[in-house]
Amino acid sequence: MRHTPIPLAALGLVLLAPVRADEGMWLFSDPPRDKIQASYGFSPDEAWLDHLMKASIRFNSGGSGSFVSGDGLVITNHHVGLESLQKMSDAHKDYPGDGFYAATPAEEVKCLDLELNVLQSTEDVTARVNAAIPAGAAGEDAARARRNVFAQIEKESHDRTGLRSDVVTLYQGGAYHLYRYKVYTDVRLVFAPEQQAAFFGGDPDNFEYPRYDLDICIFRVYEDGRPVHPEHFLKWSVKGAVDGELVFVSGHPGDTDRLLTVPELQFLRDTSFPYMMDMVKRREVLLTAWSARSDENARRAKDELFYRENSRKVYDGMLAGLLNPAFLAAKAAAEEGFKRRLSARPGGGEALAAFERIASAQRAIALDFRRYRMLEVGDGFNCDSFNIARQLLRSGDERPKPNGERLPEYSEPKRDTLELDLFSDRPIYPDFEILRLGDSLTDLAERLGFDDPTVQSVLAGKPPQQRAAELILSTKVRDIAFRRQLYAGGAPAVQAARDPMIELARTIDAESRALRRAHEAQDEIEQEAQATIGRARFAMEGTSTYPDATFTLRLSYGAVKGYVENGAAVPSMTTIGGLYRRSEEHRGREPFDLPPRWVERKTALNMDTPMNFVSTCDIIGGNSGSPTVDRKGEFVGIIFDGNIQSLPEDLYYEDVQSRSLSVHSAAIIEALRKVYDVNVLADELVNGHR
Amino acid sequence: MRHTPIPLAALGLVLLAPVRADEGMWLFSDPPRDKIQASYGFSPDEAWLDHLMKASIRFNSGGSGSFVSGDGLVITNHHVGLESLQKMSDAHKDYPGDGFYAATPAEEVKCLDLELNVLQSTEDVTARVNAAIPAGAAGEDAARARRNVFAQIEKESHDRTGLRSDVVTLYQGGAYHLYRYKVYTDVRLVFAPEQQAAFFGGDPDNFEYPRYDLDICIFRVYEDGRPVHPEHFLKWSVKGAVDGELVFVSGHPGDTDRLLTVPELQFLRDTSFPYMMDMVKRREVLLTAWSARSDENARRAKDELFYRENSRKVYDGMLAGLLNPAFLAAKAAAEEGFKRRLSARPGGGEALAAFERIASAQRAIALDFRRYRMLEVGDGFNCDSFNIARQLLRSGDERPKPNGERLPEYSEPKRDTLELDLFSDRPIYPDFEILRLGDSLTDLAERLGFDDPTVQSVLAGKPPQQRAAELILSTKVRDIAFRRQLYAGGAPAVQAARDPMIELARTIDAESRALRRAHEAQDEIEQEAQATIGRARFAMEGTSTYPDATFTLRLSYGAVKGYVENGAAVPSMTTIGGLYRRSEEHRGREPFDLPPRWVERKTALNMDTPMNFVSTCDIIGGNSGSPTVDRKGEFVGIIFDGNIQSLPEDLYYEDVQSRSLSVHSAAIIEALRKVYDVNVLADELVNGHR
């Protein structure tokens, strides 16, 4: 599933191969009009782009979506909405498992802590950012100066427009753009199918094709207690996607690493991925085993388990790409070629030296990587209670500082986001917390060594499981009133509370911050070096390329198109009939079982209705829920996954077998009307209003 | 499940605490008569012991069993028989899933490569072994001398008696005993329940109590094409185990580490277990995901997946014990106390110095541990084809050498065992082989580093998955005629064949053997040091103790007795009625689903029949399938597991909550008669003959 962006190492820069047909996650401010025109005889104009941009939505929980009615309906994937569904569920009401439909506005259920962003405008602020970095400043000095000017620009913009304002680093520092968003935080659930239908085939069919998933979830956005009426929303195409036709994807690809240099790829292959795979597989085993003990355990662990299984497939696929010597050899050859061209240019020596700095910074990052992950990223303390405790501790310490000197997540412009998360009333289950904390404390002791002084202070003379139970059962951070009180009282109140979990966070805080500073200093060296190489590259290649993904709005394009696998043709579309056949192949057993409603309504459905389809559009994690639109800008489907061949796409695009997967717009209407009996909702989608 | 012995590091020696009530896996030649008498007012005599010994059976695949009729019936656990059931299955006949009953002798199905051993006598050969080690010999010299004298003693005994003859190292080299076994290789399946009934509750309930498993499998042993008529077999107790009564367990505990020194425990905690846990969890995820893709995948992976899930619980449990600072502190204090007593004794300095040698050897072993596991143990080449290829390569190289200089598994006395395995016609599935080899080659590249020269030669410029496919699809080692031809032709034939998998084994063979030599040299230093400490200990403590387990026959004793958990009493027995209630709690969903036959026959069954029971008998992996007998020596149940509290028992025994689990003899008869309609078989068990 193309869900939450996968955080990888620092990004690289050198473009190593010419852009392929249909490749690219393009800026709306600089779309590849000529390339689209050349391949498909169509060129999007400003109005077309502006409409699509303002109808596109970022889910800050890690995904994309779009407005699809003038009365504020938003569609995304079920697996993007899952976190919200999970948070509104309890032992009595299982939104992910049962599905949901609000027949009237009064029945719509408010999400607990979901923030949606809608991009309104972008502005190039490169010159101002660069001017703010003192000549010769490097490392932490440059980083602080950059953080400061970011914060200034963001604050000015926010004060002036009232819009959320983020400075985004593009082209690895070749450019800085200011993005302004309308922010919505009152988001209510209208419709979700059963997870069985949304994620039919479960983990076994995840990242596979052919597929048959109704991976959608529909919300309505409110402001001041009333539905919003967005000026821009997508017209629904009843016919939907057509084989061979041009389509676009407008969404928020999270993070790509296509420009990494060879030492950075080696770091991923030799340090980062082996660590991440051990962690992800360890947690998958933990959650799978615990889920099997009871239905209620399974319900509580569902979204985290889904995320782990999903990550495991992604890491397996990407590592397979990195362990392909042909890929790395081609990268190395292209990098050598680029360096030769650089050395032939006046001033190219500066960029060549930058390559060396990247290699050296990467080695430094690798040295402390495990410790950095365990303590600062928090892999050793995998539970909600620890995260809240650390937020309370650090907000007390950070908020008295000037804005530009704070850790970015505690700066003023991020305050709403922080408070939304910190005061969320999502359920936190002590037994599930103990399970995860106990296992991650065990992992901490294994990875850093039992005799390590930090491990010893963390465990405080107890076995990890016992220490976890003691911490979880004695901390008060699950009480929201307690959180509010400490947050309002700041550091003195936090100190006075002597809460065991907060004190644990304090125990490691000095070391953890030092690890972060060291990591970010090297990261900063890399970013500067990348920016240096980036400027040299622009001088050579102009704007013929797109920047690596940054979880900001991008435009992809391509054709609805099948492919060949093991000598057999895989058609571009599946049908609703195929869903029933796939279920029968597995004798209806989990996760190939159909919800009862689908079994009952089988005869009412048109079996030839297109269900899912593939296209060559270039997507990555974060694109989940992106609208797929045709050249008229109409909604013909919704992105929900890539096939197995697309897994190394974080590192390189190919269009031979690699494909994006969408749910077809016709399947959505067919299911709403004939399976779920929600004609009112189907009508609103088709008509664009209630 | 108390199945295959877990191979751990070299054993330690220092007894750190007095033996607790009911503790111990005692030699039949030296049972703790006084202790049993004191606790239970009973003392087993020679005839009682001899009868039980000769009715007890070792399953060389990793378990225990017993003769239960004069016509050669043998009972063990379903999970001990599972490997054999799996090997006789194919896509058309699923013995583990469907269960089986042979109504007539002609229908009994022969196992492919199963060897059973029945102990006939033991003999103390300590003096002869010690005399054969030249004074002052150490390391590899001492090891070779010891291997030589072992091989001599074993060969003489085998030539004289025709019995399999193994010299067993006891008390860490404090004593050496010669064990003589009758060997049976014609073993035929008579009865197996469905795995659903045998392993009801699956992985979630594994190592838990209360339990409701019919974990049995019944074979008949043949010789010269006719059933054997053993002189010694166990009389069946129809009443079975009774709460509060004394019971004995006679079986083959695989491996305990209760006498490890502190540096050895630290090695397990810091090096061995973290490595093993990553590997086991990685493989569990691989097999689980592949199994979910289709029913046939699941069938093929079933026994390996079971083994991985089982190992994961064991490692989690044992690591939890090691990460308990109280346990390690107690060990350290006891070790210090022992050293103080040693230093007060004349000649104690020798044993004190031995402690230092163990610590130093352990550090050396830790250095190369990962490489040793990957290459020599074969973790980097996890597939049957590689194992066969290496056996062919090494048998060609080893068999021309004098017996005592060969790797032990290629010595003459082990020839039958080697050939049984090498020429087994068990099914080997290329797709499953590629899956496992591809994943383990990836693991090899991750753990040793992609740029490592050995990794580079192994991968030969291909991505791991592609290299795995190429090797598996081109090797001929799955063809038994090919294997026979190369085995007969020796090294020249092996060389001439140029088989790609054998050549892969050759590529790593020099380094792999060097790693083994280095490992075994340190191991030998440890063994010598342990023997030194062992002798000092005997001088101080006499024969009041039992030796660590060595997968040889031992006697445990204890009471049928419940325990208290979280303040609530857990009774000693469950009933058949409890089985149905547990299934209903989980709405009959996997793995809590009952076989159709159990659903149909529910009303016929006596719900109050005891199903499983717990006792304080001291067991460990390898004890699976051991008969539980009462003071009359009658079969009252069969060991199949321990509870979750018993998992650290490899390291220390406790009798507060830790319990052994048995299937009750009454449940077996009730199920055979009323669920499976096999009165003929039930009559044979109850009457002791057909």
Image (spheres, coloured by chain):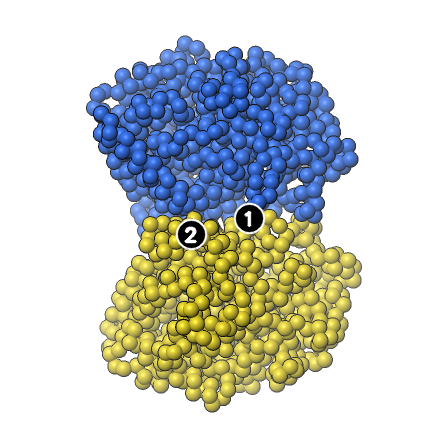
Chain colours: A yellow, B blue
| Callout 2: chain | A
* Circle 1 Cα neighbour tier, 10 Å, few/some/many (<14 / 14–19 / ≥20): some
Work out whether B137 lies above or below B2: above
Q: Are marks 2 and 1 on the same chain?
A: yes
| Callout 1: chain | A
Q: What is the x, y in percent for residue B638? A: 58, 28
Q: Is residue B514 left or right of residue A458?
A: left
Work out whether A650 lies above or below B622: below
Residue A18's tag is none
**Residue ID at (35%, 85%):** A127
* Quadrant housing residue B361: top left
- Identify the amino acid type marked 2: Asp
Which one is nearer the viewer's eye here, A40 or B75?
A: B75
* Circle 2 Cα neighbour tier, 10 Å, few/some/many (<14 / 14–19 / ≥20): many
| 3D distance between C-alphas at marks 2 and 1 | 17 Å
For mark 2, what is the residue?
A443
**Can residue A275 be seen?**
yes
**Residue ID at (40%, 20%):** B166
Residue A289's tag is 1
